[in-house]
Structure formats: structure tokens, C-alpha cells
Image (cartoon, helix red, strand yellow):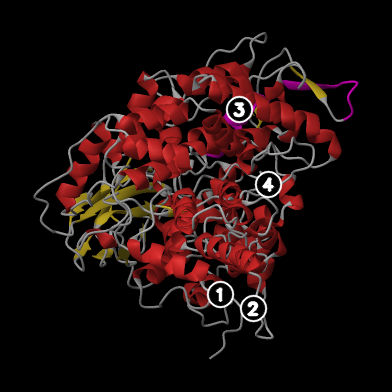
Amino acid sequence: MTTIFRPWSRLVPGFLLALSAPLFSSAEETPAKKPLNFVNDIVPILTKADCNTGACHAKAITGQRGFLLSLLGFEPELDYEQIVKSGRGRRVFPPAPDQSLLMLKAANIVPHGGGKKLDPDSEGYRTLVRWVSEGMPYGAENDPKLVGIDVSPNRKTMPVNASQALKVTARYSDGSTRDVTGMALYEANDRNMAEASGTGLVKTLDLPGNVAVMVRYSGFVSVFNIAIPLGAPVDTLPPAKNFIDELVFANLKTLGIPPSPACDDETFLRRVSLDIGGRLPTVEETKAFLESQDPKKRDLAIESLLNSPDYADFFANKWTALLKNRREDKADIMANFAFHAWMRDSLLANVPYDEIVRQVLGATGTIVSNPPVAWYKRVKEPNQQLEDVAQLFLGVRMQCAQCHHHPFERWSQNDYYALSAFFSQVGRKPTAVAGEDLIFHKRGIAEVENKKTGDKVRPAGLGQAPPEISPDEDPRLTLADWMAEKSNPFFATVLVNRYWKHFFKRGLVEPEDDLRDTNPATNPELLAALSKYFIESGFDLKAVVRVIAQSQTYQLSEQPNEHNAVDHQNFSHFYPKRLPAEVLLDAIDGLTEAKTDFPDLPPGTRAIALPDNSYNKSSAFLKVFGRPEGASVCECERVQGSSLAQSLHLMNSTDVKGKLAVANGRADRLSKPEVPVMDGIREIYQTAFGREPTGEELSIAEDFLVKPRTDAEGKAVDPARAKRQAYEDLLWAIMNTKEFLYNH
């Protein structure tokens, strides 16, 4: 039967609010029951039912159909106003609580766009009915307040395909506790490894490793950590070369995942040349390395790459994209070139990381006199500055905290504006150069207004009290000081995690710039040790690269053994990764001996040395293969996967065909009569793969190159032309192999 609402319930909400609780209490209520509290008892029900998510009534600005709730109940006063007073009080009806629109919609008795959210027989539904019948109390000022939650157990080793029921206990300011297991929300950080039901039942799946289940209740979060062992015998381990190996191998032994053996010399040299120098090793480098009997030759190769311009070019390419060195019009060219050159020179000179960050954040003057000023040309607003700095240099995503409490962390709006206040005194003056400003520090009190509360907020690091900053001091330098403190839990950690992902395809924390308690590392001891090492090195970026590349973990084979093929997070073997767009273009140029020309740059400039994003427009290859535009500080902007467009581009684009057939290119040179076929094949394999061809590969390639060819009419093709075309085809086939396209 359809319910008809009483007209007076819409017209006199004040009368409804004045109704006393006893007058409308249902018969089954007893005086012994404690009065309900809106924050403690009602908001959790709405959250559990997904009513206050962004997809439902917490949708930004409008909510749904005029009913607006705060995201996840972080602003209960607003929610109370919306439920009880807005809409002329039509959402609640104390004379018949179960006939309230709030109840009828939630139970889908009256058509509800979100479907059925509460069953009339559920405890949550009954609590809502009781609350309405009691006159919708908000709660007394001295009512206990939630101060935290605990999950039990909080850590456990579980086999695959096992189950564990969790218990969640809420702690209140008066020392009381409450079992809130049924009202908490649960989410695994890797759904391929574990799943969690709404009742707190966690089930492990088929993959071994470490996984965490986030538990959320009324603005507080906790984590249930699970180790899922494979259980295979780990009788022998490769010799540990440094602390990385000790911690990785200890974790593998605990999980029962035997690591693969070390890779061979050919694989290592190609791998490390691509990861540190962004290029393939030359044939001469490969021959010298393979012939060397020096037991330290791998360490020497790492050192040589670190001291080369290739290292600076490759990592400057990475950092300038993250720092948004974008060209949006022709006037940007000077700033972009200057900023890229400064970053490259800083990396080549191994300027400490904290000093590089300080020079960017505290930049003053003009771009000509001080290139780091270019960052402020692209990132102009204090809110964007704080969001970029937090995500890039602290691994904390603060964007959502501008409007509401971070849903998965402890950061509030005040934390957001406290970070923003560090940039509140950045001043700008126009210069004689169009589009270029003079950046300076404005003297005055650093503070910003919280746009929601109107309160003035002083600068403060995350989780810190506001420091004393005089009007003459640049607050940005205070921010840089806090970042570089040894006790800072974010600054060093996000850097080593970012670099770990660069070398291993995935970070110890994923995504690499999302550090939070509810997203723990797969090997927290290793992440902490790397962070400590980086700090104690004096924020030496080359030291981080060196210790990772020297580890036995990095030098493991990509070939899985009979047990560890399922491992995707514990680094029991090397995870092959696709070559970045710039590296792949340079590799193809090197393989074909062709050159890609770029506007405004000297002939022969490599793709990894391009200063900004503008060259993506002039190079279809870079665009198809996903070179980032530098529009965000997220490395996710770079395309990591493969696509049909990429395959088609490699197979039949005029660009690639032109490189294969270029005059005086490799195919042209090797097809000359004086070059023995066997030598030509070996050169191609050494260039592309850093190794000699196998006997079978050599035989197949030789047969292909020497066989006579005929044209479409069956006439014999000139032998010289046929040989050249055969070499072009061989290069094309090599170029399209996974072995060439991937670092392995």
C-alpha cells in the first residue's frame, strides 16, 4: 500500500522538532535504553548503507534530488540539518516513524534511485525508526565521543582460500567500548589476493604475498594485515649483497616463495643500461663487459652509467615531466629549456635531493637568473602548489581534503589549508619578457582562510603544530626544512618508493605516491630501511640508484621457477616492463641507425633528452606510445600498457618503414657485399638484445637473408636489392619481438 504523507508534516517542521521523545516512543522501547546520539548511532548507519558516498547523496554540491549529505559523514551537523530540517522537515515523521520518507526511501518502499539500502528487519533500520520516534535527538554536549577503533586480529598469517572473521571495537572518550563489526566498512587493497564481506569476513584467494584490509568506521580507520604464504620449500637463497637482499629474501622465506637464480651477464648489462641510462648498451660495451673477468664488473658498469650524461638525461626527463615542464605556447620555450637544463645539471652533479626540492619550492627571481622559478610559471595557485607538493614530495594525496576530511586518512580541511599557507606569501611582478613574472616573498603574516569555516589557518606540516614564522621569513623555506628533517615520515619514503618502482615495475607501496596507513607496503621493513639509508646518505639520489642496482634482488632472472610465477609483489624474480616511449624510439633509432629530428634542437638529440612535452605533437611515435604531457604530478600519466595502435604503428607506419630503409642505415650498410652475413646477424642481435644469437636463430636468419627473391610477377629481384630488403625485414621482425620491446 502506498503511503500518503500528512500535509502538515511539510509545513510545520518546528512543531515536529518540539515533540517530546516519550510521547512518540514505540511500545517495545524500554526506559533502560540509552538515548540515541546522531553522530555515534545514526551516521554510521548511513555510511554503512552507502547513503553518504560520492555516488549517492554526498555527490558534490547538489547531492541527489536535493538531499545533500557530507561525504562519509565527516560533517554531522550538516547531515542533521539536511535530514531533520531541510525540505520543510518532510524526511522525518515522528508520529509514525516507519512512515518517514527517510525510512520508506531507504527500504525502497517508495521508489528510490539508489535501490534498497536497508531491510526493515535489520538492526540499522530499527535504530533509525527509534531515533525518529525519540524526536530525532542530536545528542548532548557531554555524550561520549568516538576516539578510535581497533580491529582484532590486526595481523595474521593465513593460507590461500582461508577465512577469518574480524571484530571491530569502537573506543569512546568516557572509556567505554562498543562492538561495531556490523557497522564498519571493509576493503582489501588488492582484490586479487583477498576479499572482505560487509560483515567483516575476510577470505584469501589464490595468490600468495602480503595484503591489507582497510577497516573504516565513523572517520577512523584501522588495518588488518595478512601474510599469505605459498608454502614452497626455500632451501637455498642467493647470496645477499646488501640490506635489500636480506629483507627481500627474509620475506620470501617467510612466505615460502623461492627466488629465481641470478640473471646472466648479457641480460644484466641490457637491463641496467636501460634503467639507469635510458638506452641500449652499445655492441662495444657488450663485448668488453662479456670478456671482462673482473668479479666487480657489474658494480663498475653501474658506476659508469651513474657518471654518464645518459643518467642525467634519463632522470631529468622523468623529473621535468613530474614537475609539469609544459609548453603551452611559444613564449614558454625559454622557461622550459632553462628548467630542463637546470634539472639535468643538478642530477649530473648529484646535488642532494633535499636541496633540489628546496631550490624549487623557495625559488625567487626570474627564470633567466634562477631556472627553478619556472615551476611557479606553470603552477600558479597556492592550492595547486600544495596539492602537487604533497603528492610529489610527500606521497600524500590532499585534493579531497580541500572540501572534506580525507576518506582514507587522518587529514582534515585544516591540514589542507595549513599546507596551502606555506605558499600564501608568494608574490609576482610582471617583467619585460612577455609571460614571465618575477617571483618574490611578500613580507607579512603567512595565513590563509579555510573557505568552509572562515577560520584563519597558519602554516604547518602534516601532523605538526604551526611553527613560529616571522613576517620577514619565507614560509616556503620552513616547509623545505620540515621536509628534510630525519623524523619526517613522508619525504624520503616516497622518493625511495618511487625509485623502487622505476627499477622493479611496481612500488613497495602502490600507487607509488599514495602513502597512508591504510595502504601499507608489501615489505614495510624494506621500505623503512631504504628510507633510512637515503636520509643517512644525505639525500644522495645516486646512492639510492646504486644500492638498488647492486642488489641481488635487482639482478635476479626474469624467468620464474616452478613456484614463483604467481608472485607479483614480493620480487622473487624480475618483472619485465615495457620500454618507455622515449627509450623505445631511441632504441629503434639505434637498431636501424636512423635519426629522429626534433624542432629547435640540434640534430641527433635523443628522445630521452627532450626538454618538454611539445615534441609529442610533432612525433606520432611518442604520442602513440604514451609519453606524458606533464599535466599532472602522477606517474600514471605515462602509458604503461600496450595497445593495438602501438602494434599497428610498429608494423606498418611510414615512420618506422622509413627508418628501416634509411640510406646508410644498418640494413643498407650490412647488405654491402663486403659484410659477411653471419657478422651482420650477430651485430643485429648484439645491438637489439645485448647477446649473441642462438644456433637456431643464426641458422634461420641466414637462410632468410641468402635465399633468392622474386617480385610479384615472378621475376628474380636484383641480389643486392633483395639482400637489403631481407635485412630490413629482419630488423623489422627483431623490432617487434617482446625481447626487444621489454626490459627483462
Asked if the residue under mark 2 is in contact with the one under mark 1, i.e. CB atoms within 8 Å, the reply is yes
Q: Hey, what amino acid is under mark 2?
A: Ala
Q: Point out the stretch of residues depicted in magenta.
A: 412-434
Is residue 425 at least partly visible in the picture?
Answer: no
Mark 1 or 3: in front is: 1
Q: Which mark is residue 218?
A: none
Report which quarter residue 118 is drawn in: bottom left
Please identify the quarter of the rendering in which residue 458 is found: top right
Q: CA distance from mark 1 to mark 2?
A: 7 Å
Specify which label sits upstream in the sequence, 2 or 3.
Answer: 3
Marks 2 and 3, how far apart at CA = 54 Å
The amino acid type found where label 3 is placed reads: Arg
Point out the tag, 1 or 2, that comes first from the N-terminus: 1
In the rendered image, residue 326, in percent from the top left (x then y), is placed at: 72, 40
What residue is at 32 percent from the left and 65 percent from the top?
A: 195
Q: Is residue 333 toward the left or the right of residue 349 in the image?
A: right
User: Which label sits in the foreground, 2 or 3?
Assistant: 2
* Pick the front one: 170 or 224: 224
Sooner in the amino-acid sequence: mark 4 or mark 1: 4
User: In this image, 416 relative to 305: left or right?
Assistant: right
| Residue holding disc 3 | 344
Which residue is label 4 attached to? 595
- Inspect the image, locate mark 4, and give the three-letter code of the amino acid beneath it: Lys
Q: Nearer the viewer, mark 4 or mark 2?
A: 2
Q: Earlier in the sequence, mark 4 or mark 3?
A: 3
Q: Residues within 10 Å of mark 3 (few under 14, many from 20)?
A: many
